[in-house]
Image (cartoon, rainbow, N blue to C red):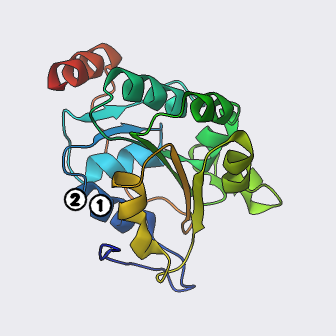
Amino acid sequence: MDQQVKISVDEQGRLRRRPLVADLVSKRDDALLVTGLGGATYDVAAAGDSDKNFYFWGGMGLTAMTGLGVAIAQPDRRVVVITGDGDMMMGIGSLATIASAAPSNLAILVLDNERFGETGEQIGLSAGCTDMALMAKGAGFETTATLSTEEEIGSLPGLLYKTPGPVFVVAKVAPGNDERVLPSTDGAYLTRRFRDAL
C-alpha cells in the first residue's frame, strides 16, 4: 500500500524538491541516507541533521558507489542514496556495478530538476533525450521508475524503504534552489560520526 506523501507543487504543477525530501526523511525509520553534494545534501540537512546521514562532499559522481559500499557493509540496514541528476550522470557507469552486486537493501533516488544547479542552473542532460531510469534498467536494475506527478509520488516511500533492491527512482522536480542548509563539511568528522552511528 502506498504511503501518503505530502505534496507541494509549483505554479506549473512540478514537484517541489525540499518538501518532498522532508517528507521522505520523516518516513525513514532506521534507514541510512547517503546524499550527493549540493541540493540533495541541503534538502536532507534541512529536514533534520542525523548521525545516520552521510553527506558526500567534493566527490561528484561517487555518491551511488558510496551507497553501494555502505549497503554491502551493512546488509541488515536499508541504505538510501539521495542525489541529483548531475551527480548521477557523472557516475552513470556505477549502475552496472551496483546491478551486478545486487544489494537487496539499496535504493537510489535521483532528484532530477534537469539543471546543473551548483554551477548556474544550466540545462542538464536529462532535460533532453537522456532517460536515467531506462539506463538503470539496461544496467540490470529490476525495479526502476520515473515519477513526476502528484498521483505517482505516493509510491515513492514504498519504493525507497520497502521494495527489495537495488531500486532506482528518478523524481522529476521543479528547478530552482531553496536556501542552503549546510551541515558540517568536515569529511573526517562526518565519516567518524557515521561509523559511530553504525
User: Which image quadrant: the C terminus?
Assistant: top left
Residue closer to the observer: 144 or 129: 144
User: Which image quadrant: the N terminus?
Assistant: bottom left
Residue type at mark 2?
A: Ser
Residue type at mark 1?
A: Ala
Side of 14 where 73 appears, left or right: left
Dot 1, how many residues are within 10 Å of its Cα: few (below 14), some (14-19), or many (20+)? some
Say if residue 180 shows up in the picture: no
Side of 179 where 192 appears, left or right: left
From this view, report whether residue 187 is shown above or below residue 184.
above
The residue that disc 1 covers is 22
Q: Secondary structure at mark 1?
A: helix
Q: Quadrant of residue 156?
A: bottom left
The residue that disc 2 covers is 26
Q: Residue at x 53, y 34 (%)?
A: 102
Question: Disc 1 and disc 2: Cα gap in Å?
Answer: 6 Å
Q: Residue at x 34, y 67 (%)?
A: 19
Query: Where residue 70 sits in the image (x, y, percent)?
Result: 38, 26
